[in-house]
Amino acid sequence: MATDPPLAKIIESIAELRQQVQQWRRDGLRIALVPTMGSLHAGHLSLTELAARHADRVVVSIFVNPLQFAAGEDFDRYPRDLAHDQQALAAMPVSAIFAPSEATLYPRGRSGITQVSLPGLSAEFCGAHRAGHFEGVTTVVSLLFNLVQPDVAVFGQKDYQQLVIISQMVRDLHFPVEIVSAPTVREPSGLAMSSRNAFLSAEQKARAAVLHEQLQQTAQALRNGRRDFAVLEQQAAAKLSAAGLQPQFFAIRDRAIGAPTAQGDQFVILAAALLGTTRLIDNCLV
Ligand code: AMP
């Protein structure tokens, strides 16, 4: 009879985390961190596999970070199920799950505390629609880097703007952490996996696939040599609206999320749209 794989241990306190990290360091082991907000799906799990290729020990952090939710967003109803997450990680190369409480990470509360922020890009695209979101992300990731002191940290390309902002933060603050990006894992329909997909009805889930389809169509137009960026963006947004989504942005940018040039041949297309009350984001590298 096959036996179940052992569950990775859950660490809740900073003292225990530090003790564990120090032990690994004494043993000369490389440490990888995969920051998440839990409600784990195959996309998250693929990040742990990639992390294990870059390090000897993988720590997955699970923390629904209140600082990165704007007022009125889904912080309270964001799905949380630590027991399910621990089960999902049992088959993965994960040594520990760091799942601190809010009081552990932010003992002085949510306001009036030291924040890390990257001006400019943090206020564009997702940041323009989610006030304070990226400041919350850069603050919590800095905290996690200080606590876990990883050699490498893995982030998904699905959150492309987040990846660019964190990479810049690491350079600006000289964090000794290598940032590795992981490809987006998708449903068979093409829909990018996301914890928020749990909010979609079956009908909405089928409809949501149009976002990826449209990104691919615009990517193909760019590959075919089209450089009328504004027209492509408008046409794409109109098609998303016609399919019943409410696009927030559909933007062709260079890989650093700067303005694209007609001579350029490397682009990223960023898109976000509401479907009902659920916010979908996706992107495509060209
Ligand atoms: P989250 O729990 O949504 O904060 O995501 C934690 C990490 O998983 C982030 O680095 C995300 O970019 C990454 N991630 C989320 N969804 C996917 C996906 N479908 N494929 C790959 N990585 C993902």
Image (spheres, rainbow, N blue to C red):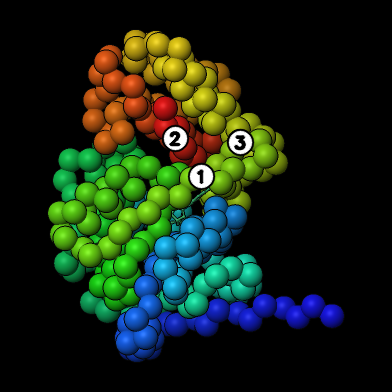
In the image, 39 versus 110, the foreground residue is 39
User: Looking at this view, is 235 or 248 the one in front?
Assistant: 235
Which residue is rendered at x = 16% and y = 46% of the image? 119
Mark 1 residue's CB less than 8 Å from ligand 1: yes
Query: Which amino acid type is marked by label 2?
Result: Asn
Q: Which of marks 3 and 2 is nearer the N terminus?
A: 3
Q: Residue 266 location, x and y as percent?
A: 34, 27
Q: Is mark 3 on a helix, strand or loop?
A: loop
Give the distance between the C-alpha atoms of the residues marked 3 and 1, in whole angstroms: 10 Å
Q: Name the residue under label 1.
A: 184
Image coordinates of residue 111 in percent, x first then y, are 22, 66
Q: Which amino acid does label 3 sit on?
A: Gly
Determine if residue 209 is in view: yes
The residue under the point 18% across, 49% down is 118
Q: In this view, does 35 lie to the left or right of 42?
A: left
Q: Which mark is residue 190?
A: 3
**Is the Cβ of the residue at disc 1 closer than 8 Å to that at disc 2?**
yes
Residue 62's label in the rendered image is none
Q: Which residue is drawn at 64% across and 43% down?
A: 187
Residue 283 circle label: 2
Q: How crowded is mark 2: few (under 14 residues within 10 Å), some or many (20 or more)?
A: many
Whether residue 210 is situated above or below residue 187 in the rendered picture: above
Amino acid of disc 1 = Thr
- SS under mark 1: loop
